[in-house]
Image (cartoon, rainbow, N blue to C red):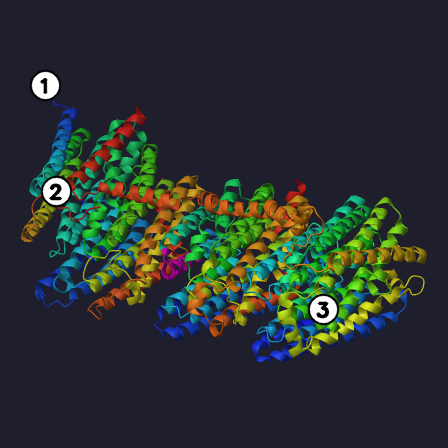
Amino acid sequence: MIEAPNVVVLAIAPEISLLVGASLVLMVAAFLRGRDRGIGVLLGIAAFAVSGGFAIAAWGDPPVVTVAEALQVDQLTQAVRILVAGCGLLTLLVALGWPRMREAGAEYAAILLFAATGMTLIAGSNSFLTLFVALELFSISLYVLCAFDRSSKASLESGFKYLVLGTIGSIILVYGAAFLYGATGSFQFDGVAAGLAEAEPGAWLVALGVVLVLAGLLFKIGALPFHMWVPDVYEGAPTSVTGFMAAATKIAAFVALARVLAEPLAPVRDTWEPVLVVVAVATIVVGNVAALVQDNVKRMLAYSSIAAAGFGLIAIIVGGEAGSRALLFYLAAYAPMAIGAFAVITLHERDHRGVTTLESIRAWGFERPFAGLALVVFLLGFAGFPLTAGFLGKFLVAGSAVESGWAWLAVVGAIGSVIGIAYYLRVILALYDRSARSGVHAAGAPGLASVSIAIALCLALVIAGGALPGIGIDWAGEAARVLAAGR
Amino acid sequence: MITATTLITVPLIAGIVILIVPFAQRLAGYLALLVALGMVGAVAGFVYRFEPMAGYQFGDDAEWIPQLGIRWSVALDGVGLALAAVTALVVACAIGYGLWARRDRTHATFGLLLITEAFLFVVFAARDLFVFYVGFEGMLIPLLVLLAVWGGDERRKATVQVVAYTAFGTLLMLVAILWLGLTAPDGPDFSMAAAVGRGNDLVFWAFALAFAIKSPLFPFHGWVMPAYRQSSPEVAAVLSGVASKAGGFAFLAVLVPLFPEQSARYAWLFIALGLIGFLWGALLAFRQPDGRGVIAYSSIAQMSFVVLGIFLLNAQGSTGATFQMVNHALVSAALFLLAGWLESQAGSGDFRRLGGLARSRPILATVALVLGMAALAVPGSSVFASEFLILLAAFADAWWLGTIASLGIVLAAMYMLRWISAVLHEREGDLVGQLRPPDLRSGALLAVLPLALALIALSVAPAQLTERVDPSSQMMVAGAFADKEAR
Amino acid sequence: MTGLVWTALALPLAGAAVLAVLGTRLPARGAGWLASLVMLVAFVCSAIATIMLASRPHEERAVVETAWTWLTAGSFQVGLELWFDELTAVMLLVVTGIGFLIHVYSIGYMRGDEQERRFFAYLNLFVFSMLLLVVSGDLVLLLAGWGLVGLSSYLLIGFWHQKPSAIKAAKKAFVMNAIGDVGLALGILLLFIELGTTAYTGVFAGAGSLDSWTATIAALLLLVGAVAKSAQLPLHTWLPDAMEGPTPVSALIHAATMVTAGVYLIARMNPLFHAAPYALETIVVIGVLGLLMAGAIALVQTDIKRIIAFSTMSQIAYMFVGVGLGAYWAGIFHLFTHAFFKALLFMGAGLVIHALHGEQDVRNMGGLRSVMPKTYFCMLIGALALVGIFPLSGGFSKDAILASALEVGTPLAWVAYIGGLAGALLTGIYTFRLMFLVFHRRMSPYAEAVAPTAVKHHGEGPSSMLWPVYILTLGAAVVGLLQVPGLTHVFFDWLEPIAPAGMVEPSAAQEWLTTLVAVSIGVAGIAIAGHLYLREFDATERMRLGRGRLVDHALEHRLYWDDLYAVAFERPAQWLAAVLRRDVDRPVAGWLPTDGLGTLTAFLGRSVSVIENGVVRSYALVIALGMAGLLLALLVRAG
Amino acid sequence: MSVGLPFYLSVSAILFAIGLVGVLLRRSPLTTLLSLEVMLNSVNLTLVAFSRQVGGSDGQVFALVVMGIAAAEVVVGLGLVVAMTRREMVLDTDELRSLSG
């Protein structure tokens, strides 16, 4: 007699809506074949909205472990669901401004929905199996999305590179999971934790497993020394996808890392903590320093996102309630800034019909005051400038570090931010370079309204997160309690 | 009811609106001027309603980020009000000058100036460390953009220097603020009141460094020359006139009250630096080749003198320092506007190419003389009154201190006389002969005149200011003074 | 009564403001008349106020009134305080009275100058500053007036600002006075710290309670201010250069009023100086040295105004001796008479310069007696008064000072007495050297070419210039009669209350004796001058005093004070500033090597991104190496 | 001779190394994909070996899942290679360097 796995359907309603949405989009695309006129994308937006709606409605519900104990649906999962749905929604709005969406919008939307499903699942995974499957779900979707612009060699190149390197990352992760399985006899997080608690310290299987799992996850968040793919992929991928990766992938991967460290790997903190400290410092330094010399704005933002990952790692190291809350807020704050910044770059690419570099962006801020100002706000947010969500994020992270005796890490982060100000300023200065003439102005291209809406939404979120962050901090705090309790 | 919050929000919102909404260029300028004048009116109302003995007034205190113990806590005492008042005046004059000079991209210039004003008000009114940081850091970016976009030929380098010095200082201060706020005994509390006396030496130095750079105090003045020389006149006026006062104000209103023990212990160091800077700046001003150089180094000298006055930790020192800041704000703002006017009309600020401008330009001669005489603290002027107070405080502290400091006053006479005669007197410079600059009239005159008139008014009855400031400034140094006495 | 004084104080300020604001909208001629009218009203106010003061009983003659609080901080408080007593009244009358005459004189003197309005604005501003100085009842306020007279002096010396020499002189005067201001300020600070107040009432009351060291230091610091303002040793070098200003300015500021402020200060602060005997002795020493030195230098000067300037310095040194000996009344009396005859001499010199189209070198004059008889007569009266010939004013006052030295009788007083008499000899020589060179002997070619035609066309000067000279001539002749030894006591009686500790008063016999000796010496001096300079000689010839080249050289170079200051202060300061600017400031302030840091971070950034070579295989290698590194690190830790 | 866990693990490690070296050395995209498959299979071997050691079927299930995912990955990878060929890009991973720095 086979026992049917226990599935609480309502608890996984957000994922179901994403998947149903994806299927619907694909069907519509199949039936309407070329006459889709954005219906697919609109459906995708609706799917994200419904998914996010379910998650919001379920906010505060007691945690559930479901789908044969593969998933934990708790506040943390809900938070990621909401965030990812928001990111997806905004990304689709931005993507509408991309000419290629007229022919392939439905496919784009469907793959994006799949990727988002993977991201929400990874946040709720309760075993390494789920973790791996979810990771691959969104990774493979992203490989496709990166290469989505088949007309662009850069896009194809970035997709291929991401595929090769990402697969190596996944293999490392799963290899590590295998070793942990060997050491503890379980893939379930609680089982691993129990096994590790009993394992003799310094056992090589454990060490191997921990390092490999860590490496696999660090790869996804783009931390040193596994960051190599980030600049190339961010640069080559279609800009809306880059924004989505910078925002949503980071959220999913960081939450997965945090959960893995807080639940299965909590007993071996001594093993991974020094590793993470070194990685965090190196990531902050290298990310910031390398960003300083970039002329391609997307590439510069890629390096800056590496640096941001390093900053997030500080919060991971600090851990506990304060650290986790800071991490979640930081990620949530980062998302609208990243999507918004890349949305502005989408606009500029259209205006300029080419790559966004410090050269091509000259004086563009005067042509498009709103977009220019929005970019300035997003960049200031990245830099951690007061009254932006990014500042509060950094404030919370540094605060948690200072509070729990990691003040020197906060100082490292602060120094990194000084360098950060320098390269963000380079962009701002180019944007408002009076000595240059922008000259390019492609007014009124279709789909731009949706981009502007997306930018406005991001702007509102960034400012609200900086000026009135109370609700956000509360939410982050509630979600973070899951991680803090995992100890 | 007009409160400190109104004072902050009105220019902030107005600045953003002017920045974004595509008004006609002139309209944007006049709107900005109107708002700036409105702020002058509002501050004048405060001055009228101010009760010197009643401590902090016109305040607001509301929950902002309760999770972190951060409150929107703003209020003005005598010291803050004095500086807020002079800020309103200087910004209005700077905008007026910009209007006259027909600065291009009016929206951005004046919008950013108003935003700067708002953040300056935040600094002067903050009763919460977080709020204070927001203002302190917040004013930096608009000023940087103004410098970087509308600056002179070497604006890029100047911007980098300003960023390198100031950003570094403020970010370390942020870490210190975090420490103070998060380690409060009854949960996180960022109010200044809760931070009194809790800081250790490290935190003290982090604050002190940030303020020393901003002031600028010797030897942290490396960024001053490039910034003051490359900025457009109205920005230089705001930068040296009021933005630098944020540093001096912070010494008096934040550092000394919050760290009474350390302030008393290390007062000797600040006194020494102040003294050296006072003489240093004066000596260097004496050899500068152009007007901006003289004003810049005299600013360094004056602000060093202010710091000296503050760290004498007695009533005359602190009141004198506040008064001196007000005076210097008026003087240096007016001188920078005048220097800018000269450069625009005569093509250069180089002393070798100017001269003889007094001839048939009676208004220019009169205004320049009044300002020059105020700057060199001719007895009877308001600058004299404030310097006398600081000198009195220094003399009371140690007779030799007062005696050495008095040397700087003689030097001030020397460099200001050099400036006056190099511009107004002696033989006509070649540029004056070629370009035949007109007399100081209309817009430019209206921009400079209020500052000069304010100086004259303060000379007639300086007690009108000191009576309002004195109780507050005494309160600020009371703790440190007691500590010093006990030592 | 105080209302009148306030009015007298406010009027010149208002006049200056009106002239400054209206500027060129005012007719050029109107400015002078407006300014003069203001001065006349101020004088009338002062005079009435003085009469009202005189009608009061003695003990009610010091009137204090506060208009508003000027400055406060902590326990420190300064009021805009008026102090009106006998001494103030004298100063008020001198400043407004002589000031009025010089204003009128200036109308003629400045005619045709395109910047006439500015001149009168400055002149009125000066009068306001000077009045503020004398009526203030608080040391800080006095310092304000002190500084403002320095400012107006600067403005007026540099009035012809196209002339680099004028601007240089103006700056020099300002800086030297700024040094004095600082000294005065430090003295005031010390007094405040010791006494807790800077108001005269408090200072006078507390001065006696100061210990003698504090009192001496405070008094010496005040003396620094007095010395600088009054162009006494060693801060005197600005005065001769100040002659670059228009002549009325020299008459008003650098003869009659401002330069005597130091004497006023000492007299005013007599309770403090009384508590500081060493300071008083210092004043006497400075005075004696100064009067001899200035007199000697005056012997060889060739610029008519500079001769008078050194004479001024010398006469003020007499006043210093007077106040230093405790004969405050005598010092002020000499101040009073000096104001008349020195202003007269300057104005006469102004007439001469006017007639010679701006020529100031006495070698280019000569024989003007016949061309300008009125001027000659007036200046002769002035010169005789200066030398102290009985019964002209200067004699009474100077002899009062010297007689006081007799009365005091200490060794220092004897030195002062003898020095003063020697000074009288010098005074006789240089004064009449001036008179003889300018008015007697044969006309120089230049004078011959210019003067007769000029006078023929314009007369000796417009009546606005001549009438003030006549009035001053009258004054210089008669004001000494206020205090004739044994006969009239007006001045002494009037001023007696200002010194609570009493003043030195010589007996009539001492005075008459001194007068006898001094007049003889003065006449001897005139005779020597006549012997030396009445004979004809070539104008290009160097005007030697004696045979010693060294002495000549030294005197012509004013005993090298300027060179000393240049070597000791000016050049080192310039050098220091230059070195700081060129070599030191950058390394000190640029401790944050932004360029270097920028290059460094850029270099690091490039090196870091070098491994981002785009080749997937190398990326994989880095990942593999990174993993291996992590494993190795763990193994090392574990092992 | 009994073949124990260490043997399986060693073989799997060798396989992993072979795959890695393949990725590091070969420049053909197809071979790179192939090498990745080898690495994945080394992981599978480890999983199965541990599964036997630990008991239960979790590890074997995981291995099956890995195979499925590997298949998906290869599909995407090959699709990319086809697309690149269509764009007439040189099929040499070292030539994919337009994105660098």
The answer to whether marks 2 and 1 sit on the same chain is yes
Q: Residues within 10 Å of mark 2 (few under 14, many from 20)?
A: some
Q: Earlier in the sequence, mark 2 or mark 1?
A: 1
Q: Which residue is mark 3?
A: C348
Is A34 in front, or is B418?
B418
Identity, as a three-letter code, of the amino acid under mark 1: Met
Give the image location of residue A262, x and y in percent: 33, 40
**Left or right, A329 with reference to C285:** left
Residue B305: percent from the left, percent from the top? 58, 51
When asked about the image quadrant of residue C46, the answer is: bottom right
**Marking on residue D1:** 1
Can residue A111 be seen at all in this image of the molecule?
Answer: yes
Chain under callout 1: D
In the rendered image, the quadrant that contains the N terminus of chain D is top left
The residue carrying mark 2 is D94
Q: Secondary structure at mark 2?
A: helix
Residue type marked 3: Gly
Q: What are the residue bounds of the magenta stretch?
A: B138-155
Q: Secondary structure at mark 3?
A: helix
Q: Is residue B63 above or below residue A446?
A: above
Q: Nearer the viewer, residue D96 or C579?
A: C579
